[in-house]
Image (tube, rainbow, N blue to C red):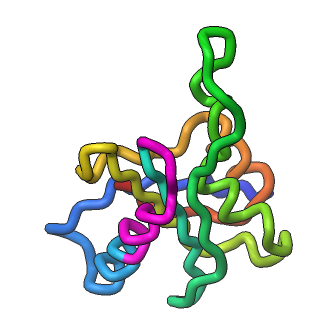
Amino acid sequence: MGDAELELIKYDILTASNSSIARMQRTINLTSVSDMQQRHAAILFTGGRVVSVGINTSRNVPSEHIPYDAISNHAEINCLKGIDFRARQGTLYLARVSKGGNIALAAPCNKCLGYLEKRTTIRKVVHT
């Protein structure tokens, strides 16, 4: 889309602003809607307001013949696929909560990074 690179920011509550803390908390809370073992959520914020939300969802039954990343629709894609192309801008927050209830790393995979870079004008992703 643009020449600017996508900035990936690892969320750090110690250095985050109050608005970033509130946005990440909303994203973490949204993971509870996912029925996957590793629950992911994404919220797109533009100008301080929620534009769209998404969680990871089952796509098919995993087996030794199906790659791991083929078993779910990723939260960031679900968040963006239902909105108008022009609305795909702002800051995307991503969170993951493990099956044990712990907050875990939620950096976008390479496929999702490619999607974000080619099909959106999002330039900032904040992730757990």
Location of residue 45 (image quadrant):
bottom right
Relative to 61, is 118 on the left or the right?
right
Residue that extends furthest to the left in the rendered view of this protein:
14
Question: Is residue 33 placed above or below 115 in the rendered structure?
Answer: below
Is residue 127 a member of the stretch shown in magenta?
no
Q: Residue at x 23, y 50 (%)?
A: 102
In x, y percent, where is residue 82? 80, 68
Q: Residue at x 63, y 19 (%)?
A: 67
Question: Is residue 126 placed above or below 104 in the rendered structure?
Answer: below
Residue that extends furthest to the top in the rendered view of this protein:
64
Question: Is residue 76 placed above or below 66 in the rendered structure?
Answer: below
In x, y percent, where is residue 121? 72, 65
Relative to 127, is 44 on the left or the right?
right
Q: Residue at x 58, y 24 (%)?
A: 68
Range of residues picked out in magenta:
26-37
Which secondary structure type mostly characterizes the magenta part of the structure?
helix
In x, y percent, where is residue 73? 67, 45
Q: Residue at x 64, y 32 (%)?
A: 71
